[in-house]
Amino acid sequence: MLWALLALPFYSFAGIPEGTAWLSIQQNADHSFGNTATSLATPVQSTAEVLRTYAALGQQGLPAFVNALGYLNGDSEANTEFLVRKIVVNAAAGNDVAALITALTRNQNADGGFGNQAGQSSAILDTAFALHGLAAAGYASSPQVAAAVGFLVNRQAAAGGWVEAITNRRSISPLWPCGACGRIETVTSV
């Protein structure tokens, strides 16, 4: 009997069709997600996370996915986080991300780190975001990644975390930057 249950697709257990149907009616008229009075994230952040969810569930053919991807790709903001969100979603969808990678690497500084925008000081979180995007796009063995990992290693505190130099107040858990480095290590050792 157990083998019969294991042969069923995963989504038949988890209510995925109901969940994706609910998500599709949450989409805004401009095809973004979020941007309500209770939203904690920007429409780009919310939309990218919904797209990642659709992709993880193999639901890239849904009209809500296609329309939301159009919204995301139409956003002209060139900050590191938003570029990485676009890279991750588009790479997972099999789309060409070369132009996005070029835009992202403009935000990398001589110290190997990434700033929020081109010409801005390197930041731990922006560098970790950039590493996630570069890994997702298949650039894990690139010189940009080696320089970014070097930046993170050089800025790591003795206790294992990071203090963001821009604010000098916020201690950053080692989980996010190490997660980025771990993804790079996993991709390069395969």
Image (cartoon, rainbow, N blue to C red):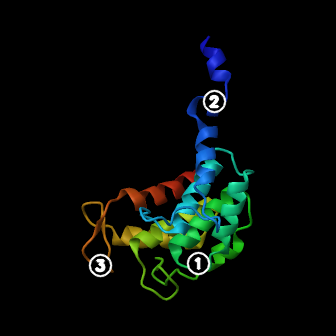
Q: Which residue is mark 1?
A: 105
Judged from the image, the secondary structure of the residue bearing numbered disc 2 is: helix
Judged from the image, the secondary structure of the residue bearing numbered disc 1 is: helix
Q: Residue at x 69, y 47 (%)?
A: 59
Q: Which residue is mark 2?
A: 12
Q: Which residue is mark 3?
A: 167
Going by the image, does 94 lie left or right of 29?
right
Figure quadrant of residue 96? bottom right
Q: Residue at x 33, y 67 (%)?
A: 156
Identify the image quadrant of the N terminus.
top right
Q: From what the image shows, is residue 168 above or below residue 51?
A: below
Mark 3 Cα within 10 Å, few/some/many (few <14, many 20+)? few
Upstream in sequence: badge 1 or badge 3: 1
Upstream in sequence: badge 2 or badge 3: 2
Going by the image, does 46 lie left or right of 11?
left
Coordinates of residue 114 in the picture (x, y in percent): 48, 77
Coordinates of residue 28 in the picture (x, y in percent): 60, 63
Q: From what the image shows, is residue 112 above or below residue 96?
A: below
Coordinates of residue 27 in the picture (x, y in percent): 61, 59
